[in-house]
Amino acid sequence: MAALSNKENFLKGIIRENPVFVILLGLCPTLGVTSSAINGLGMGVATLFVLVMSNLVIALVKNLIPDKVRIPAFIVIIASFVTVVQLLMAAYTPALNEQLGIFIPLIVVNCIVLGRAEAFASRNTVFASILDGLGMGVGFTFALVLLGSIRELLGSLSIFGWKLAEADGMLVFVLAPGAFITLGFIIAIMTWMKRKKSVNP
Amino acid sequence: MATIKSSFLNLLITLGVITLVAGLTLGYVFEWTKAPIAKAQMDKQLRAIEAVVKGYDNNPVKEKFMATTPDGKDSLEMFPAKRKGELIGMAVKAKSSRGYSGDIWIMVGFNLQGDILNVVVIEHKETPGLGSKLTEPKFLNQFLEKNPGQINLNVKKDGGTVDAITGATISSRAFSEAVQLAYETFQSVNHGSTQQ
């Protein structure tokens, strides 16, 4: 892997290698929790924390872990941070914790986290890994908030819980099919923009 | 990348050390968050009680007791609300396991006549945007000041008087069932102990 500048390490996760819209990783929580913007934000920030911490620790200990137990070791580290997040959320943001429910423990099996550990943190310096985790986390949060905002706006006519009109929205956007439809449109628009850029430089 | 050889002993030591450190860290965090988590849950219960019964000067949580449901299958937590030592109402915590996903926990406040003072949802795992509308005043308000002894607490589809949430009949049905259960349990206690 070619060494990237610090700025690149951070920025690539936000748009160019956005984990949700471009790499299409971690779609389970993406589709599951984004029925409202605030859920997307909470999930995004929780994942961001786990990503940064696990990238940090894995980059620190990468030379001490024999290749054969690499994956189990990474998973233990990731699972520990997820449990920490869950306990902290239950203690200090009980309402959000209830909203996100099962999706918080499921961060353990979010492919983004293990993917970054394996593809980046296990072969880069600690500092670069933190930046990578931050960038990917911000990218993931951005994707979730965008998706959640659109779905909340169309589905419940509100944004971040602020009711815009006293009427029912299009219910389908709050349910699972709406998640797929919205995500499909966002990816289509992003691909379209990318193509246009490469055709007319 | 890894500079340690994958010998059996190395594998054993590495995994052992990692899981040990992880376990100790988690144990520490668990101890550290135990009190705040308990407090958060306590606060939630208190808020629910405050929302459903008014004007009491005792501590309903301290005087909590368990009451068996009329069918004898379960027992519910009852929080008596008293003013100057006299019972003025009761907050009843009830649940229904017949929701769309998971248990629905509610807190219902009754006055001594058995009228519903207020009802709140404590916990549910219903579908966001559908069943989750249980928690909204639009649905809850229809229960206020009603006496379950005088109306048929069933959704209209089943011949009752409850306006079900569009697309969430199952959740509405489970909710009504929990209210009914709370009422019946409260009545059996009320008639047993406070009737003059």
Image (cartoon, grey):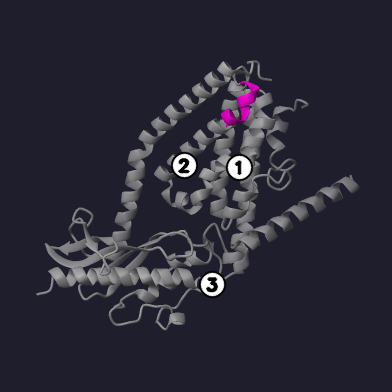
Asked whether the viewer can see residue A170, the reply is: yes
Q: Earlier in the sequence, mark 2 or mark 1?
A: 2
Q: Residues within 10 Å of mark 3 (few under 14, many from 20)?
A: few
Q: Position of residue B29 (x, y in %)?
A: 41, 33
Residue A21 image point, x, y percent:
71, 48
Query: Considering the numbered disc 1 on the image, is that residue within a helix, a strand or a loop?
Result: loop
On screen, A80 above or below B89?
Answer: above
Residue B54 in view (yes/no): no
Quarter residue B112 falls in: bottom left
Quarter of the figure with residue A180: bottom right
Q: Residue furthest right?
A: A200
Q: Which residue is mark 3?
A: B167
Quadrant for the N terminus of chain A in the image: top right
Residue at (46%, 68%) from the top-left corner? B171
Q: CA distance from mark 2 to mark 3?
A: 32 Å
* Chain of the residue on which disc 1 is drawn: A
Q: Is residue A71 part of the magenta span, yes or no?
A: yes
Most foreground residue, B29 or A45? B29
State the image quarter where residue B33 is shown. Answer: top left
User: Alpha carbon of mark 3 to alpha carbon of mark 1: how far?
Assistant: 31 Å
* Of the two numbered discs 2 and 1 in the rendering, the one whose residue sits closer to the viewer: 1
The x, y position of residue B116, in whole percent, is 29, 73
| The one of A192 and B164 positioned closer to us in this rendering | B164
Q: Which residue has dot 1 on it?
A: A110
Q: Residue at x 34, y 74 (%)?
A: B144
- Amino acid at circle 3: Gly
Specify the subunit that label 2 lies on.
A
Q: Which residues are magenta?
A: A66-74
Tell if the residue under mark 3 belongs to the same chain as the one under mark 1. no
Q: In the rendered view, would you say B1 is above or below A105? A: above
